[in-house]
Image (cartoon, helix red, strand yellow):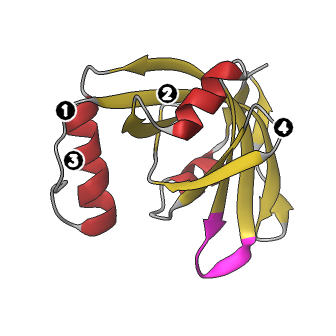
Amino acid sequence: MAVRIGPRLAAFLGEVMPALIGTKRSDGSVQMNPVWFEYRDGRILLNGGENRAWLKHARKDGGRITILFVDPKNMWRYAQMQGRIVRTTTEGAGDHINKLSLRYLGRPYQRPTTDRLLIEIVPERVTGAGGGQPWDVEPA
């Protein structure tokens, strides 16, 4: 079941920080990858290639994915989000990777923007804390 993100967590997710995604491999082990992300309209947007191992793992596991967001200045300010991939599209994916590159690096993406996927994730559970308080989430 999806959760609704409150204003405190939305502000945290609006900050520039890398995220770590975890997906389950077919042998049951977990694969972790750093990613750029964007929070928009209650969803997490990632960008990747069709052949990314983490995307293949998530698809085989019903779209399930875990994302860890950690404040680089205070590791005790973090959110762990479990969610589900609800949509992947090539439409707008090239523009999106450029937007992420500008956000994280301050310059346009330097590699080809073709064969990219825009990956949309709906949050289903959030744990962690910001400033010693649980995040403001509620059932959607």
32 vs 129, nearest the viewer: 32
Specify whether residue 127 is in view.
yes
Left or right: residue 29 compared with residue 33: right
Q: Which residue is mark 1?
A: 114
Circle 1 Cα neighbour tier, 10 Å, few/some/many (<14 / 14–19 / ≥20): few
Q: Which mark is residue 140?
A: none
- Please give the name of the residue rendered at 70% of the width and 18% of the height, measured from the top-left corner: 62
Secondary structure under tag 4 reads loop
Q: Which residue is mark 3?
A: 98
Secondary structure under tag 1 reads loop
Secondary structure under tag 3 reads helix
Q: Which residue is mark 4?
A: 28
| Mark 1 to mark 4 CA distance (whole Å) | 32 Å
Q: Amino acid at mark 4?
A: Gly
Tell me the magenta residue range: 70-76
| Mark 3 to mark 2 CA distance (whole Å) | 17 Å
96 vs 33, nearest the viewer: 33
Secondary structure under tag 2 reads strand
Q: Which mark is residue 120?
A: 2
Q: Position of residue 36 (x, y in %)?
A: 44, 53
**Residues at discs 1 and 4 in contact (Cβ within 8 Å):** no
**Residues at discs 3 and 2 in contact (Cβ within 8 Å):** no
Circle 3 Cα neighbour tier, 10 Å, few/some/many (<14 / 14–19 / ≥20): some
| Mark 2 to mark 1 CA distance (whole Å) | 18 Å
112 vs 15, nearest the viewer: 112
Disc tally is 4
